[in-house]
Image (tube, rainbow, N blue to C red):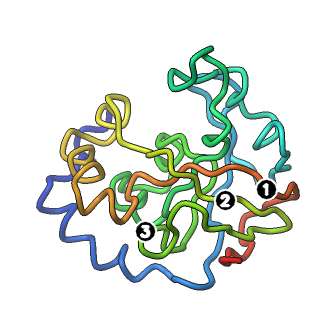
Amino acid sequence: MDEDLHLSLESLYAGLDEIRESPKDKGVVNLVLRRPSKGEREILEEAEIDLEEGVVGDCWKERGSRMTKDGSAHPEMQIAVANSRAVALVAQREDRWALAGDQLYLNFDISESNTPAGTRLAIGSAVLEVTPVPHNGCSLFAQRFGNDAMKFVNSPEGKELHLRGVNTKVVQPGRIRNGDTVEKV
């Protein structure tokens, strides 16, 4: 699967400075998507964000979670948010961003130091809260972007910068569009 686009660990680390330059106070939404069913991706211009459903039309709720006792959807993993600069680096082409499977791709610093758990983000007319549930690279991430990419995002530095992204929950429903502003509240 596009192995020629899998960067070496050295090349990935060489891209860290660009990621660290992500805006800390005011960013922008670069991509919105939903996953209608497992493995499917639908790129959207706009998404409705709901308190119960997360991204309306996404399979988050139906898919459930291995992290809950009864297998139901994890309430603190409603919407996965990625730093678009980090995804651009590992994916190498914009048409491959959606393979990461996150619902929102932001040009915004989502590092632990800038957006620790409890941080609220106003995005469009919705507000999301960063949760403490880790968002780590997995075997599918390695398959799509390479083993070095998984090592990169799961490294101590990668985890501090949240290179694989953050999990969020909806605290205020609304709409999110490509190009919307992202701000901490």
Q: Which element carries disc 2, helix, strand or loop?
A: strand
The picture places residue 86, in percent across and down from the top left corner, at 39, 62
On the image, numbered disc 1 is attached to which residue?
Answer: 171
* Whether label 1 touches label 3, CB < 8 Å: no
The tag earlier along the polypeptide, 2 or 1, is 2
Mark 1 and mark 3 lie on one chain; the one further toward the N terminus is 3
Q: Nearer the viewer, residue 164 or 127?
A: 127
Find the distance from the CA under tag 1 to the CA under tag 3.
20 Å
The answer to whether mark 2 and mark 1 are in CB contact below 8 A is: yes
- Assess disc 3: are there few (<14), some (14-19) or many (≥20) residues with their C-alpha within 10 Å of its C-alpha: many
Rounded to the nearest whole Å, what is the CA distance between mark 3 and mark 2? 14 Å
Compare residues 163 and 101 and report the one nearer the observer: 163
Q: Mark 3 and mark 2 in contact? Answer it, CB < 8 Å.
A: no
Q: SS class of the residue under badge 1?
A: strand
- Quick one: which residue is furthest to the left in this view? 10
Sequence-first disc among 3 and 2 = 3
Q: Position of residue 166 (x, y in %)?
A: 51, 53
* Amino acid type for the residue under numbered disc 3: Ser
| Residue 53: quarter of image | top right
Q: Nearer the viewer, mark 3 or mark 2?
A: 2
Residue tagged 2: 129
Name the quarter where the C terminus is drawn: bottom right
Percent from the top left, x then y, of residue 175? 86, 58
Residue at (29%, 36%) from the top-left corner? 142
Q: CA distance from mark 2 to mark 1?
A: 7 Å
Q: Which amino acid type corresponds to the residue marked 1 in the rendered image? A: Val
Label 3 belongs to which residue? Answer: 111
Disc ID at residue 27: none
